[in-house]
Amino acid sequence: MNGASHIASSLSAILPILILMGTACVALMGDVFIWKRQRALTGIVALIGSVWALVVNLQQILGYGSSEPFSGSLVYDSLSQTTSLVLLIATVLSVLLAITYLRNRGLELGEYHVLLLFSASGAMLMGAANDLIMLFIGIEVLSVALYVLAGIARTEERSEEAAIKYFLLGAFASGFLLYGIALVYGATGTTNLQQINHLFSAKASITPILVAGIGLLIVGLGFKAALVPFHQWTPDVYEGAPTSVTAFMAAAAKVGAFAAFLRIMNAFMPVQPAWITAIQVLAILTMVFGNLLAVVQDNVKRMLAYSSIAHAGYVLVAVASTGMIYRHAVLYLSQGDRAAMFYLLAYVFMTVGAFGVLVLLSRSGKDYQTMNDLKGLARTHPFAAYTMMFFMLSLGGIPPTMGFLGKWLIFNAAISAHQVTLAIVMALASVVGIYYYLRVVWMMCFQEPEGAPATEHPVNDWAARWSVIVSLAGTLMFGVLPALLSPIMTGLYH
Amino acid sequence: MLAVPTEYYLALSAILFTIGVIGVLIKRNPIVIFMCIELMLNAVNLTFIAFGRHFAQINGQMYVIFVMAVAAAEVTVGLGIIVAVFRTKDTIDVDEVNLLKF
Amino acid sequence: MQAAFFGVIAFLSILSAILMVMNRNPVRSALFLVANFALLAVLYLTLAAQFIAAVEIIVYAGAIMVLFLFVLMLLSLGASHALRERGGLQPLVAIILGLIFLASLSAAGAIGTLGPGQATPQWVKNGGTVKAIGTALFDPRLPWLFPFEVTSILLLVAVVGAIVLAKRRV
């Protein structure tokens, strides 16, 4: 293949990412020329761009292609396409939330959407990375934009504190990740994940330097994915950041980190004994402590933060049961990968939806924060309360929701990969989880509202409403009829 | 040919990285914590270049170029955040940035 | 001879790193870090990375550290604002954790089956020149071109972010 046609085919393979980046640039330039009152226009541009990218991404998935764009820096296969799909859904929902939230809180900055789109494109690059250094740059694009987004409410102390905490720990984690990359390079002589896989498939030699490298990679990614014991930043950052940012952060950063986990662990599949124990221990710690600490929280955002930690533990169970299969030179995802991607999609719908309800309830100068704020919500804000109820049931893993089905798939994958201990711990941890999700439902539906209802100005919140409705539709529809996903997640359902 | 074996460079870089980690854990001033993180990144750069020479590949030096670009981006945003914190709180004495909190 | 030279530089760089961490005045810490970067640049020269050595001085010791000092001066966080360091158990715990980390790493490195280095005199002469780096970076057959392009996005994000955070209240 000559140079020009290779570049052309490479560009078409990453078209969704290019559309996102291009839209961000257009929004950045256009924002300068918009009057302040019409700032929502930037959000609309971002929305159009991300929906367009989503459509192109769906076309690509239905085209069943696979290639290695840009001389092996990226790989374009079912895993990267599905990751992009999940991330783009999260982006569309978050942009919708942001349009309402920014207006409610008087934070209408066009740069918000620009950074959000760049951040999403970074996460998509992580899912498509075929080289560890490409993965690192993807993580940095994702994180640098998120650091700024966390601190975008410049006049609020808590937002700035969240930003600096997230930034320092994120940069610290990047250092570990990078050291891991360096040691893996030293152990193998390459950072190309496919070459690493071929190398170890030919001769699985576990050297100490390799073990140290993989360990540091897991620590670095563990910080980004908020696994116990690298989770301490999560509740503070989730609580302090503006709610619409938290929704995106919880969804995109986690999906990106787990896409990276799946890529790396699949590359190191031939040397599985070198890392499987670490993943198992992390998964158990994350599930147990995530759920136990969520029980004692009184702040809804903190509770959701610990619940997102617990959910990271469930996905990690799927990572522990992973293993891609090459059949006739075509990549098929193993049961573990499929379960992980399905669960991540469910997680995006549930989490963005739950934070979306909090966005709906946000009024100028005030966020709904504590459990007491939620008391009697069914009477004062029935739409918010009943949608929140479904998200809580789904997060708790109660049928017929997507959350239940995702847990079921991961459980099965773990059993068939002989990870019985993990499967049992997961089942027990989920039972604990149900308690605090149902507590929210109880507060909303069976408690009297506290204090006099505040007089609220009617606000135009169509955007956040649509986001919540779409999340709810996804949670229920794919929970009842998962087969609807099969033409889309073909690589996942073979 | 090589008078100094690669292992020596690796050991030096491990020591520098560890000093950086200890610094991050014990310092309170976010700017100094951030400097310690820069030290960690530089230690990693040394590892990359040492391995690059070991394998006689250009790769090691390529990674360092990317790491430097990333470090520059992080510094820009990080110092921006620190200035913003200073504006809202009039101090950067952030006790909340307590990395060893259990 | 080379080993002795390496020993001196390595000792000085460890010393400057320790002094950076120990010092209470952030401005002095920054200066020790600059010294550390300069010493690392010397080590890069011994590793046949001429271009990187120059960039280390220009970008790290020049641009990045000046930015650090600029912020320190802007917020006037010099000697008078030297923060009280954490007392009690925490530094001890941190140092013990660090030593465990170092011990495990050095154990990994020492037993590491690295084998003999593959660098030929020819490679040492031409390996890290501007020409070698440039041709590798922009060769579409090598996997560096695309990450390089993405770096521009990263820098754009950083610029936008810094302006968003630092500009006056709207």
Image (spheres, coloured by chain):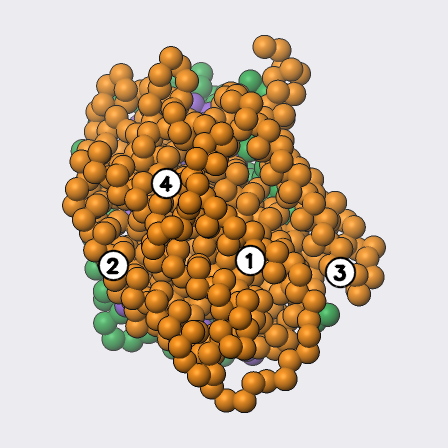
Chain colours: A orange, B purple, C green
User: Looking at the image, is C78 positioned above or below residue B17?
Assistant: below
**Which chain does the residue under circle 1 lie in?**
A
Circles 3 and 2 on the same subunit = yes
Q: Residues within 10 Å of mark 1 (few under 14, many from 20)?
A: many
Q: Which mark is residue A431?
A: 2
Q: Nearer the viewer, mark 1 or mark 3?
A: 1
**Residue A478, position in %: x, y?**
45, 44
Q: Amino acid at mark 4?
A: Ala
Tags 3 and 2 in contact by the CB under 8 Å rule? no
Q: Is residue A467 left or right of residue C83?
A: right
User: Looking at the image, is A106 positioned above or below residue A38?
Assistant: below
Q: Earlier in the sequence, mark 1 or mark 2?
A: 2
- The residue wearing badge 1 is A468
Residue A250 in sight: no
Q: Is residue C13 left or right of residue A65?
A: left
Tags 1 and 2 in contact by the CB under 8 Å rule? no
Residue A454 in sight: yes
**Residue C105, position in %: x, y?**
24, 43
Residue positioned 54% across, 77% down in the render: A380
Q: Find the distance from the CA under tag 1 to the CA under tag 3.
A: 22 Å
